Amino acid sequence: MENNNYKKLYWLLGIIFLVWMLFYLIEYSSSLNWTDLGQIGDSFGALNTLFSGLAFAGVIYTILLQHKELGLQREELKTTREVLKRSAEAQEKSEDALNRQINEMNTSSRINLISAIVALNSLKTDVVEIGLKATTDGMYIKQVNEIIEKLHPVISDELRKISIDI
């Protein structure tokens, strides 16, 4: 489309140049003395008016093109705003899904902790039974009991959190 506009502009400039040359040739060929040549120079005043009018028309044409471009830019900005709005909404949905996933992972880890506690208590019972049979001084039993006692505050906190969340 721009090439078509440039072609039109080149044709218009070519026609203007040809009219100017024809005007000059017609006026120059009709008289050769200085008085007549001065009048020829004065007669180009009308041609100057033509060029001024064409320049003004060019300015108006440029303003119309800019108006059209601004309209296209407004449409593009409107479309961009809509796309950004949809993108923001999708990002919010993704954030919500991520938060839900984090909460579910939290719950899953708490359930795994409870399973570990149950397994540890089962292990304690097994160790106690084996320890009673295997040793008379209860060395293994003491070590297992110390480990369980150290974990007891953490286990209690987690159990309390789970009961509150549920």
Image (tube, grey):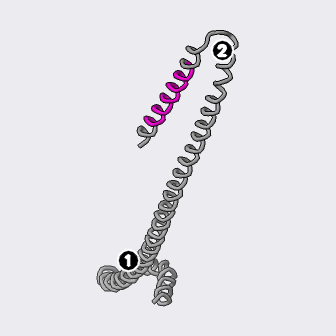
Which residues lie in the magenta part?
Answer: 6-24
Q: What element does badge 1 sit on?
A: helix
Residue 130: name its quadrant. Answer: bottom left
Residue 138 visible in this rendered orientation of the protein: no
Quadrant position of the C terminus in the picture: bottom left
**Location of residue 82 in the rendering, given as x and y in whole percent from the top left corner:** 48, 65
Question: Residue tagged by mark 1?
Answer: 140
Residue located beneath label 2 in the image: 37
Amino acid bearing label 1: Tyr
**Residue appearing at x 50%, y 85% in the figure:** 161
5 part of magenta stretch: no
Q: Which quadrant is home to the N terminus?
A: top left
What kind of element bears circle 2? Answer: helix
Q: Residues within 10 Å of mark 2 (few under 14, many from 20)?
A: some
Q: What mark, if any, has residue 164 been given in the picture?
A: none
Where is residue 83? Give x, y as percent.
46, 63
Residue type at mark 2 is Leu
Name the residue rendered at 44%, 69% in the picture: 90
Towards the viewer: 76 or 127: 76
Tell me which residue sits at (44%, 74%) in the image.
102
Asked whether residue 16 is drawn in magenta, I would say: yes
